[in-house]
Image (cartoon, rainbow, N blue to C red):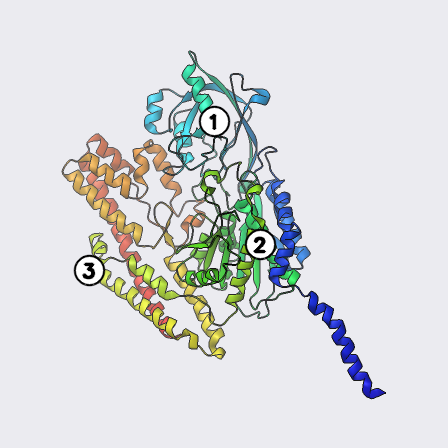
Amino acid sequence: MKRFVLPILIICLVALAAPAAASATTFDEAVDQLVADGYTIEVEETLNALGTDPLLGFRLAGTWAEHQASYYVFDELDAMGLSDVRLEAVPVDAWDFEGARVMVGDRVGDKAIIASSFAGVPGTDGPVTAELVYVGMGLKGDFDAAGDVAGKWVLVDGEFDDWWLNFVGAEATLRGAAGVVMTYGEKTYPWYSYPDALGGNDGEYDDDYVPVVYVAWQDGDWLKEQLAAADEPVMATVDSKVTMKLAENGGEGYNVVGILEGSDPKAAPVLLSSHLDAHFRAGLDDTGAVANELLTAKAMTMAGVQPERTVIFFFTCAEEYGYTDCWYDWAIGAWYAITEEHPNWAGEIALGIFIELMAEDGGPLELEAPPDVLPFLESVSAASADVLPYGYTSIPKPSTWTDQWSWNASGVPTVCTSAGGPEYDRYYHTNLENMDRVNHDYLGGVAKWNYRVIQALDKGVLPYDMSVRGDQLLSTIQTGKLTQAGVSAKAATAFKQAATRFRAAAWQWELRKAATPTGKTAKVNDELLYLQEVINATFTSRDQWDYNAYPHEAAVGDAIYLTKAIAAARVGNAARAQQMLSWYVGINWYAELFSPQVCRDDLVRHDPEYEHATWGAMGTPPLIVDCIDEYVMLGEGDFAGAIAGLKDDRAVVRADLRDRVADMTVVLNDLSRRVKAL
């Protein structure tokens, strides 16, 4: 009988294993099941129930609402069984907004005008009653035309593309106004352009400026009608309830971390990140992204998958706002994480996926990434038409307006993903951007895309295409403009030659990398991570308006147009000289619009040495050229004084540009040598 025991035992084991195999869940199946069960809806409902303003919401960094969001995500990650789940404190200036009202005429009590405000803007410290006057767009000329506004509320048409509200607030403070009531203006589009849309955003504000509240277009028009029809002063009472706890007094938010261990502890990890804070009760930005990231993590644990690379699930605070009294007040949680909490992660992470505003009908998956990683991401996207119903678009540069920037400037290869619909810009950061706009099936499709990227990174040599970087860099190097800007012909030629050699070395590597022996893959990948760290940290810069640029680009333009301004001043053409400065040099355009003191104060906050320069000091920030005094001199006819000052400015810019070109040339030559050795 014994000879039958083993076959019978095998049959029994197979029979027992069959149900388990049949019930095994794939990642995609887990996603579908979780979406069908309403998991992402549950995440949306839980997070959007949190808000410091009982009516409008708001869960900004450092407030109880943001803390509760962090605790919720912590509990979710812990329940999934991820390892090393933790909260990481981030010092922030917590802005706790409990609501605002504007009362004029019979619009009092329950009929009062509901208002919003902007993060970092102070409140009124109780109701403040004063005369209301209209001052157009709040520019220097508008205030001059309105006359004495001391002690008055000023009604302003907002303009959010050419200047920010901090300039209007600073001008109103300089004029002694009680505060600003801002509304929609004809030059505001597309911002807040629905009649009932309230607006919110980071204020880039100083907490010693006057209060600012925002009222919807329809209410702003009503206020203008009251002013136009009145025979006597119109009185307004504004009550904006804000409590601020500065970082120096213990204000803090929390980043949340959870780890899914990979099968190869030596392989560089993948980072997924979304942000926990939100204006109003935002469904897409970034609650939908948090739901997307949690869905990805939960589906991976539910399906029991283990990629080769460890996956770090990261949730940041203070993406929308983190500090008052500064310009670079957004993306603070990410900046703090990579500069203070985890600086060692630079050069160690294979790819950072930063998830933004997810996911609306009609919105293609938008990829913002440095050129080195974009071809790989595009290839995954092209093969994912089954989960990306609206296709994808791509932008070959990292975004300065998201968490992505700080990590990229530290040397981490990144992509920022988003999926907003065709009308998204009109209700971005408004009370109308709610969870009803989220397509949860599409949200699940993007989670599947996340996983496909993770899977693709597990295969062989890391997919960084440095030849595309070489193409992009070379397109920005024009030796004629470099020499015109003050770089010697020899240095300009050496720079272009270095970039050309780097591109050639990168192309040669692209041709041979597929033949990399399996036994050398780990060593090659380590070198590629080093190269990416150097490339991203060296070449991630921005222009004067905070858009992504290479380190030399802003300086070239500044030097050339300073020369043109000097030439115009020499022939007594003040208007052209001022135009060259205000339109093309640094951010001196504000001198055309606001009082000199307002402009000078703002320039100080752009200095990389400023206390709260934060991520604005990362990478290779542009030199901020202060031509405010020269602009004023030109207007007053003091050409000699203006020319002397502009020559000094040009000398500084030229010296800075020469240093940048020299430094990049050295780095490019070293990169070429190392790429050839791969």
Q: Is residue 371 above or below residue 522?
A: above
Image quarter in which the N terminus is found? bottom right
Q: Which residue is mark 1?
A: 218
Q: Which residue is mark 3?
A: 489
Mark 1: which amino acid? Gln
Element under disc 2: helix
Please name which of the two marks, 3 or 1, marks the residue nearer to the observer: 1
Picture coordinates of residue 489 (x, y %)? 19, 60
Q: Which residue is mark 2?
A: 444
Res 311 → quadrant: bottom right
Circles 1 and 2, Cβ within 8 Å, touching? The answer is no
Q: CA distance from mark 3 to mark 2?
A: 55 Å
Q: Nearer the viewer, residue 342 or 131?
A: 131
Mark 3: which amino acid? Ala
Picture coordinates of residue 317 (x, y %)? 55, 47
Q: Residue at x 43, y 12 (%)?
A: 232
Q: Residue furthest right?
A: 1
Instruction: Answer left or right for 101 relative to 325.
Output: right
Circles 3 and 2, Cβ within 8 Å, touching? The answer is no
Image quarter in which the C terminus is found? bottom left
Q: Earlier in the sequence, mark 3 or mark 1?
A: 1
Picture coordinates of residue 488 (x, y %)? 20, 58
Q: Is residue 376 visible?
A: yes
Q: Residue at x 53, y 44 (%)?
A: 92
Residue 356: mark:
none
Q: Is residue 257 visible?
A: no
Please name which of the two marks, 3 or 2, marks the residue nearer to the observer: 2
Q: CA distance from mark 1 to mark 2?
A: 37 Å
